[in-house]
Image (cartoon, rainbow, N blue to C red):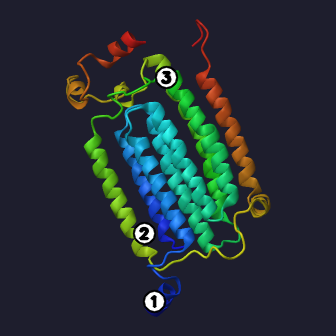
C-alpha cells in the first residue's frame, strides 16, 4: 500500500505540477477570490456580478476536467439565467444601488467561525484521504456531448423525464406565487 | 491531475457559501450563497466521476440534475422572496420574525437584533409596506 503510494507519487511528482494543474490552480484562485467578494461585498449588484466570475471560473474548471458538456450547461444555465434571475430579484425588491451598510447581519463573527471550522475540517479530511490519488485525464474523453448524450439517454432517461416534470411544477409554482392577487380574492 | 486540487477547491467554495448563508442579511444574497454551495458539490461530483471513470457516469448525470434543480430552486426562491417583499416591505431575513418564539417577553427582539430600533416587527412591516 505504502509502496504503491510512493510509486504513484514518483510517477506523478508532488513538486512538478503539470500544465493542467497549474491552470486549474490559477483559475481556482480566481474562483475563490470572486466567491469571497460575492459573500463579503456591500454592494448588492456587485455581488451578483462577482457571482458570474465565480460560476464562469467553475465552468473553466469543468473544461479542465474534460467535462465539456457540463461546462457549457453551467455557462448557459448559471451564468445565463440564474444570475439574470438574481439581478431581477435584486431590482424588484428595490435593493439599494451602491453601498448598503446593513448587508451583513449581526452574527458575522459566528459565521466566520463556522465557515473557518468547516473549511479546516473538510480540507484536512480531503487532503488526508486523497493525498495519493491522481485523475487520469489522458484517456478517452469522458464528458463530451456525444458521451453525455449516450449515457444520459441510455441509462438516465427516467430521472431525466422526472426532472422535466419537476421543472414544470417549479414554473407553475413560481407563476402562482408571484401572481398579483385581485382585490377581494384571498 | 491530482485529485486534491478539485476536492480542496470544492471544500473552500462550500465554506465560503456557508459563511454567506450565515452572515448575509438580504434574502437574495443568501440565495447566491446557496448557489455557491451547490456549485461546490457539483465540482466534487464531476471530479470524482472523472476519477472513477464510471460507466454509468453517475456523477455527471447527477451534476446535470443538480443544475436543473438549482434553477428550479432559484425560481421558486425568488418568487417567495418577492412575495415576502410585497407583503412585508423587506427582504431582510432577520426582520422576518413573525414565527419567532418569545420565551419570556417581547423584549427579546431588541436584544438579539443589533440594528432593531425597538419597534415591533408587525408595526415596522406595516409602516414600510
Secondary structure found at label 3: loop
Q: Nearer the viewer, residue A85 or B72?
A: A85
Sequence-wise first label, 3 or 2? 3
The residue pinned by badge 3 equals: A93
- Badge 1: few (under 14), some or many (20 or more) residues near its Cα, within 10 Å? few
**In the rendered image of this protein, does residue A181 appear above or below residue A148?**
above
Tell me: A186 left or right of B34.
right
Sequence-wise first label, 1 or 3? 1
The residue pinned by badge 1 equals: A6
Q: Image point 61% across, 76% down: which residue?
A: A136
Q: Quadrant of the C terminus of chain A?
A: top right
Instruction: Indicate the position of residue B85 as horizontal and vertical percent values.
Output: 47, 21
Q: Image point 49% across, 41% down: which residue?
A: A50
Q: Image point 51% across, 86% down: which residue?
A: A8
- Badge 2: few (under 14), some or many (20 or more) residues near its Cα, within 10 Å? some
Cα separation between marks 1 and 3: 57 Å
Instruction: Indicate the position of residue A9 as horizontal and vertical percent values.
Output: 48, 85
Secondary structure found at label 2: helix
Cα separation between marks 2 and 1: 19 Å
Q: Quadrant of the rendered structure where residue B21 is?
A: top left
Secondary structure found at label 1: helix
| Discs 1, 3: same chain | yes
The residue pinned by badge 2 equals: A126
Evaluate if marks 1 and 3 touch, with contact meaning CB atoms under 8 Å apart: no
- Residue positioned most to the top: A183
Which is in the foreground here, disc 1 or disc 3?
1
Instruction: Indicate the position of residue A180 as horizontal and vertical percent values.
Output: 60, 15
Sequence-wise first label, 2 or 1? 1
Amino acid at each position: 500500500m505504502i509502496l504503491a503510494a510512493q510509486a504513484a507519487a514518483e510517477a506523478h511528482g508532488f513538486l512538478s505540477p503539470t500544465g493542467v494543474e497549474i491552470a486549474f490552480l490559477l483559475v481556482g484562485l480566481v474562483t475563490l477570490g470572486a466567491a469571497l467578494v460575492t459573500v463579503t461585498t456591500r454592494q448588492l449588484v456587485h455581488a451578483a456580478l462577482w457571482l458570474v466570475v465565480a460560476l464562469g471560473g467553475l465552468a473553466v474548471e469543468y473544461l479542465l476536467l474534460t467535462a465539456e458538456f457540463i461546462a457549457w450547461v453551467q455557462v448557459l444555465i448559471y451564468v445565463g439565467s440564474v444570475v439574470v434571475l438574481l439581478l431581477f430579484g435584486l431590482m424588484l425588491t428595490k435593493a439599494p444601488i451602491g453601498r448598503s451598510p446593513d448587508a451583513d447581519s449581526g452574527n458575522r463573527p459566528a459565521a466566520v467561525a463556522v465557515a473557518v471550522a468547516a473549511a479546516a475540517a473538510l480540507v484536512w479530511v480531503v487532503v488526508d484521504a486523497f493525498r495519493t490519488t491522481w485523475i487520469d485525464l489522458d484517456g478517452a474523453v469522458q464528458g463530451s456531448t456525444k458521451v453525455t448524450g449516450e449515457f444520459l439517454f441510455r441509462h438516465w432517461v427516467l430521472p431525466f423525464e422526472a426532472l422535466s416534470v419537476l421543472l414544470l411544477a417549479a414554473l407553475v409554482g413560481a407563476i402562482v406565487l408571484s401572481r398579483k392577487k385581485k382585490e377581494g380574492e384571498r | 491531475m491530482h485529485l486534491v486540487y478539485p476536492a480542496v477547491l470544492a471544500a473552500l467554495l462550500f465554506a465560503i457559501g456557508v459563511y454567506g448563508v450565515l452572515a448575509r442579511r438580504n434574502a437574495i444574497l443568501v440565495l447566491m450563497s446557496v448557489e455557491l454551495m451547490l456549485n461546490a458539490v457539483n465540482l466534487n461530483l464531476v471530479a470524482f466521476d472523472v476519477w472513477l471513470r464510471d460507466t454509468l457516469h453517475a456523477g455527471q448525470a447527477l451534476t446535470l440534475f443538480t443544475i436543473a434543480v438549482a434553477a428550479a430552486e432559484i425560481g421558486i426562491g425568488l418568487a417567495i422572496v418577492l412575495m415576502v417583499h410585497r407583503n412585508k416591505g423587506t427582504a431582510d431575513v432577520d426582520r422576518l420574525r413573525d414565527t419567532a418564539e418569545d420565551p419570556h417577553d417581547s423584549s427579546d427582539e431588541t436584544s438579539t437584533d443589533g440594528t432593531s430600533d425597538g419597534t415591533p416587527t408587525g408595526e415596522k412591516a406595516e409602516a414600510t409596506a
